[in-house]
Amino acid sequence: MTKLALRMSEISKSFNGINVLDHVEFELEKGEVHALMGGNGAGKSTLMKILTGVYQKDSGKIVINDKEVEIEKPQDAQENGVAMIFQEFSVIPSLTVKQNIFLNRELKKSNGFLDEKAMYVQTEDLLKQLNVNISPDMLIENLSVGFWQMTEIAKALAQKASILIMDEPTATLSKNETETLFELIETLKSEGMSIIYISHRMDEIFQVSDRITVLRDGKFVITSPTADLTMEELVQHIVGKSMESSFGWKPRSYSKEEVILETKDLHSGSKVNGVDLCVYKGEILGIAGLMGSGRTELAQAIFGIDPITSGEVFVDCQAVRIKQPQDAIRAGIALVPEDRRVQGLVLTHEVKENIIYPILNKVSKSGFINKKKVDQLSEQFVEKLNIKTDSIYKSTNLLSGGNQQKIVLAKWLANEPNILILDEPTNGVDIGSKSEIIEIIRELADQGKAVIVISSELAELLAVSDRIITLKNGKVTSELSREEIKSEEDLEHAIQNH
Amino acid sequence: MQSKIINTTTATKRPAFDWRNYIVYIAFIGVFITFSITLYDYGFLSTNNLLNIVRQTAMISIMAVAVTFVISTAEIDLSVGSIAALSSLTAALAIQSFGVIGGILAGIGTGAFIGLINGLLVTKVLIPSFLVTLGMMIIVKGIAMWITGTAPVPILNDAFIFLFGSGSLGPIPMLFVWTILIAVIGHIVLRKTTFGRQTLATGGNESAARFSGINTARVKLIALISSGMMAGFAGMLYAGRLEAGRFTFGEGAELSVIAAVILGGTSLFGGVGTVVGTIFGSILIGTINNGLIIMGLDVSQQMMVSGLIIILAVAFGRKAKKR
């Protein structure tokens, strides 16, 4: 018998004719922690979704414990011992640890009633095995997130999982919780569990993994023992040599004289811990950082969504008090939020309705909306941003991601802001719209607006930014002018803070 | 390529007609024609009977106009029936000492004040509106029973009775005048003003509305205050019509109001609202009840049939599930 727990070979998958995975290879040994790495869009999550039955592969073979298996739906994955610990935990907060672990597989007594005692004992054993010191009858909502994750892992064990997939498991954990998780991973390994570990945090990868597989642009790059790789080599594999990446950088000139937006020692919640930044007129400032570094929270604090706990915001050298989005809007700030479906659009409403929400006052007179003005304005933006829709009356949920994102942009451009903050502006957007959006961002800066772009796609940041700051734990860790950055690797190093 | 052509040539095209959006009008016409034929000999179509329908539905219609706004923000108001009862009493009591103007101020003021408390509890203390207004419904009912020890308060002021009860403007009963007036105002506010847009945006996606700089708490507060005010106004109509304030007025009205709003095409989940639909929903329910009474059905049979018709109408009006 081999010691392979899983082999995925020649896996291919395409969506709408675009190859997302192209003959990808992946191997997992028994009792191994195997890191799966790659930039955004490399194909990691698609590969894992195929393994867990969320997507179906177009071609290729999956072998689990020397047996070829077909995984067509999530139940198939479960039956083959594959379990995934999700980024957004899938436990139910209002139930207890025990109830979550036995959810929908409750043990019953011969009379048909629930066998609470047996479930309690089994849960207790599991938790003991994992060295987790909580009571099976604790409500999840009373526990810290670290324990939510432990519960999910326990649930996977209870379902006799032998392959565990962890997707950015430490993103929401504190430092102590992370240490506990790593101890737990050691325990699981020694019991023969095989773990696929997905993370962008290099230091963690080197600490916890035995081997690393890198994917890039949907293709297999390398599988290597972790000990044989240096961080430089790893970054190079992830980024690839070619900087030809669809969008090149166009150096722009602007005078570094007029500061439009400045923050001093800005604090908000637990995620923004004293940020100083400034943006000049006509400048595009890129903000880079890992998940949980406080990027989004910083943007939301400046825009008045999350309360600013201390520190100051200056617009045109004047201190402004921002307590709610209306204050930020009055100060000429606009935010294109991270999640357009949740924060950007009222999806059930029409294109033109969405475009005017931030500017209701501008298209109305003493409270009455000027319909003609609304139609004109909407038509104008649909044309200007090349939004593909049958009409301005179309419901926005019927449009593609790229067109939806352009509507969110239009919303804010209609308000003619001086400061535009874009949080992941091209997330889930097709390649065509992507380059259009990047072009729009450049135009806006050329018009003299101060622009902040937050993105986890380094190629995009490098293409568009004049200057880049990196965030970690809610603080600025470095500031680089675009000229200083020679490659994605440089930026990746700055983000990892090494 | 196709999409490009469409984009430039038919950019002002309206979405296709969908009969499901008009289910309340279709149902109304269907029911009205059926009764007109089958109950013709019993005087269903007589002016008197038609005016009767309008008089009987006025209070529900007026409350439902304001509740349309509340439901459009994805909140609910269960306290309108109780508010109407209390307002009928405060109006009647105020008339005794301060005359018509005092009565009107007391009636509407009572409703506005309770609406304000509802609104503050929902937007500042962040208790779900279902619970706030359920509790308020019981509290206000208790107050209405308590202030006069369950005794009715007669109204002897002719001006008040004319304005809010038996009076008419030419051939048109005042109750109908008020219904039309409130409906027109409600329709214009919802369709033509910034507040209307803010209401629908708040209910459609509160998060996106906030990110657009809309003060969603203020929108909900105003909606709940208006709902209280209109319930107070309806209370005055009950009082004017029966020439007394009584704690039993408006009992169960909140359910008819919600039924009228939903039947009219407003989404229970917020974001979609129509005042005209609401008015037709209310009149549809009133017409069904009226016809069934003429047919000679007793109250229990009436309830069963009108409940069934409401469920059927909503079932047919339901949109095919979106992807």
Image (spheres, coloured by chain):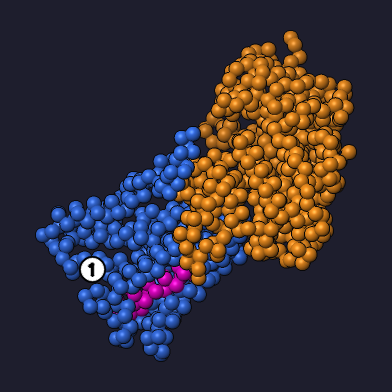
Chain colours: A orange, B blue
Q: Magenta segment: does it hold B56?
A: no
Question: Residue at 67% across / 51% down in the picture?
Answer: A444
Q: Is residue B204 left or right of residue B166?
A: right
How far from the left and from the top, in percent, is residue B49?
A: 19, 66
Residue appearing at x 76%, y 34% in the figure: A199
Which residue occupies the foreground of this view, B112 or A159? B112
Mark 1: secondary structure: helix
Question: How far from the left and from the top, in percent, is residue A74?
Answer: 58, 27
**Residue at x-position 55% and y-position 50%:** A381
A42, A445: nearer the viewer:
A445
Instruction: Identify whether A356 is placed above or below A8.
Output: below
**Could you tell me the amino acid type at mark 1?**
Asn
Task: Please say if A146 is above or below A445.
Answer: above
Q: Is residue A31 above or below residue B320?
A: above
Q: Position of residue A255 (x, y in %)?
A: 80, 54
Q: Please, which chain is the residue tagged with disc 1 on?
A: B
Residue wearing tag 1: B52
Q: Is residue B130 left or right of residue A249?
A: left
Look at the image and tell me whether residue A256 can be seen: yes
Q: Is B249 left or right of A405, judged from the image as shown? A: left
**Is A11 located above or below residue A164 in the figure?**
above
- Residue B233 magenta-highlighted: yes
The span shown in magenta is B224-246
Going by the picture, which residue comes out furthest to the top? A1
Work out which residue is located at the far bottom of the displayed protein and give it.
Answer: B97
Q: Position of residue A167 (x, y in %)?
A: 71, 34
Q: Main secondary structure of the magenta part?
A: helix
Q: Is residue B127 visible?
A: no
